[in-house]
Amino acid sequence: MNYEYHQTDLSRGILSGLFAGLIAAVANTVFALVYRGITSFYEFNGVDVTVIVFGSILQLITCGLLFSFLVHYRKNGVGFYRVIVTIVTILIVFLGIMVRQSVMGSVPYDFKFLVVGTQVIIGCLAIFLIPYLSSHDNLIS
């Protein structure tokens, strides 16, 4: 019996995004806990552990799907993917802070730093780790 499975671009993208999402969930949780511990910023729970874990994983699985489609259908898909992820990461940071500000009024600096920090972690993993993992099947299979 032969159990060897050759992965498609789609399966590589999903698995790369999932693996990067798990790493991001741990990194963002550690970042949030350390930052909150250092600054004693506990009263504003806009970014809690549940949001960090599910948000990180879902964002990076989505990035993995986007990566798989762009690599499969575009000649220079990796470069185009990195540009798109960079733009979307910047938009998420600004729109997230602006939406929070429109709902809550003033947004504390500590919350802004927490949002920017978690999104930078997610963005960097999406830009660098997903393409790396997709090209190295032995790490994700």
Image: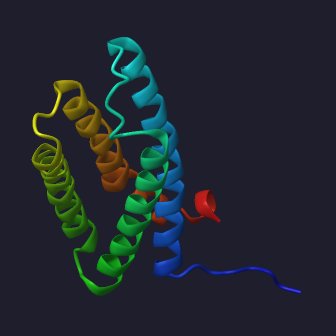
Query: What is the x, y in percent for residue 55?
Result: 41, 54
* 124 to 27, vertically: above or below: below
Quarter holding the N terminus is bottom right
Asked which quadrant contains residue 24, the reply is top left
Quarter holding the C terminus is bottom right
Please give the name of the residue rendered at 31% of the width and 31% of the height, measured from the top-left corner.
44
Query: What is the x, y in percent for residue 111?
Result: 24, 32
- Residue at the front extreme, as displayed: 104
Please give the name of the residue rendered at 42% of the width and 38% of the height, measured from the top-left corner.
28
Query: What is the x, y in percent for residue 53?
Result: 49, 48
Asked which quadrant contains residue 32, the reply is top left
Please give the name of the residue rendered at 40% of the width and 74% of the height, measured from the top-left corner.
65
Query: What is the x, y in percent for residue 77?
Result: 26, 74
87 to the left or right of 35 = left
* 35 to 136, vertically: above or below: above
Please give the name of the residue rendered at 15% of the width and 34% of the height, measured from the top-left corner.
107
